[in-house]
Amino acid sequence: MSSIVFLNGDFCKEEDAKVSIFDRGYLFGDGIYEVVPVINGKVIDKEPFFERFDGSLSKIGLKAPFCKTEIMTILDTLIAKNDLVEGGIYMQVTRGVAPREFYFPENTPTTFMAFIFKKEIINNPLATKGVKVVSCADIRWKRRDIKSISLLGQVLAKEEVHQKGAYEGWMIEDGFITEGTSSSAYIVKDGVIITRPLSNSILPGIRRKVLMSLTKEHNIKIEERLFTLEEALNADEAFMSSATVFVLPIIEIDGQKIGDGKAGKMATKLRAMYVEAALKEANA
């Protein structure tokens, strides 16, 4: 069955949604995107979502074509039209259609689109089994704090990860782990969570932000600093976070078991806390 998508002010069937070949998103990757989780038919983590969305737009000199209230109406309508209970919404804004010149065109309407996808988040079986990770080189550009649609570096890394039979890749630059190919990275040592501090080198993960708040509320120690692959291999636990998995324990990196090779207590605890908060926000 065809899903309903949103494109430039209209709701339509996915096969009817068309974008010009001269759209700057297609020609240059000139745009940004966001992914928001949906639980019990409701968008969650709305405040940090809009904060990062607005931040990415501002950093590339774009303005959203709709206000926050209008965007939420669009997202809620997509959820209703597609009977979405659990999964997410992908949303993208580009600089629009213009002749192929590198400089910013003047008075060009942006292209705004959004679509839904279904995914089991709350009862994800990987939450108890854990996932395997491999290390890979971080070959991305230097403004990773922007949620850019230019994802070739991640695509190449994801393919490398796929070929090695792993679930996710942890990228390394200058001897330190930056982040996952599509997630934030954490290790645990002696009861302390360690994660890289925010900078232009990593995306400011929304799930990371929520987890930071939850750890503060529950007096869980967290240390923001650089860490190496060797540290990760010798950690007591490792885990990842992202929009559509919340928190997943990592049981193996580069073929080596982390801890006892099972889902760690800290990751399991944090996931339970996140799920509880998400269900509360979704009135589930």
Image: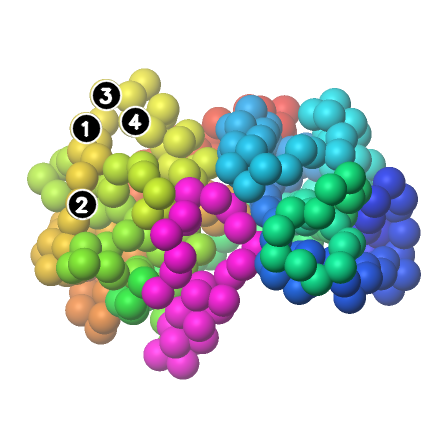
Kindly identify the residue that appears in the image at 30 percent across and 27 percent down: 215
Q: Is residue 235 magenta?
A: no
Residue that mark 4 sits on: 215
Q: Is residue 140 magenta?
A: yes
Q: Can you say whether 262 is above or below 77 in the image?
A: below
Q: Are marks 1 and 4 in contact (CB under 8 Å)?
A: yes
Which region is colored magenta?
A: 139-164
Residue 219, numbered circle: 3
Please tell me how crowded label 2 is: few (under 14), some (14-19), or many (20+) other residues with Cα within 10 Å. Answer: few
Identity, as a three-letter code, of the amino acid under mark 4: Thr
Which comes before the other along the chain, label 2 or label 3? 3
Which comes before the other along the chain, label 1 or label 4? 4
Residue 221, numbered circle: 1
Identity, as a three-letter code, of the amino acid under mark 1: Lys
From mark 1 to mark 3, how far is it between C-alphas?
A: 6 Å
Task: Residue 219 in the image: state x and y as whole percent.
Answer: 23, 21
Residue in front for this viewpoint, 13 or 256: 13
Residue that mark 2 sits on: 226
From mark 2 to mark 1, how far is it between C-alphas?
A: 16 Å
Nearer to us of marks 2 and 1 is: 2
Q: Are marks 1 and 3 in contact (CB under 8 Å)?
A: yes
Which element is circle 1 on?
Answer: loop
Kindly identify the residue that appears in the image at 24 percent across and 51 percent down: 238
Which element is circle 3 on?
Answer: loop
Which element is circle 2 on?
Answer: loop
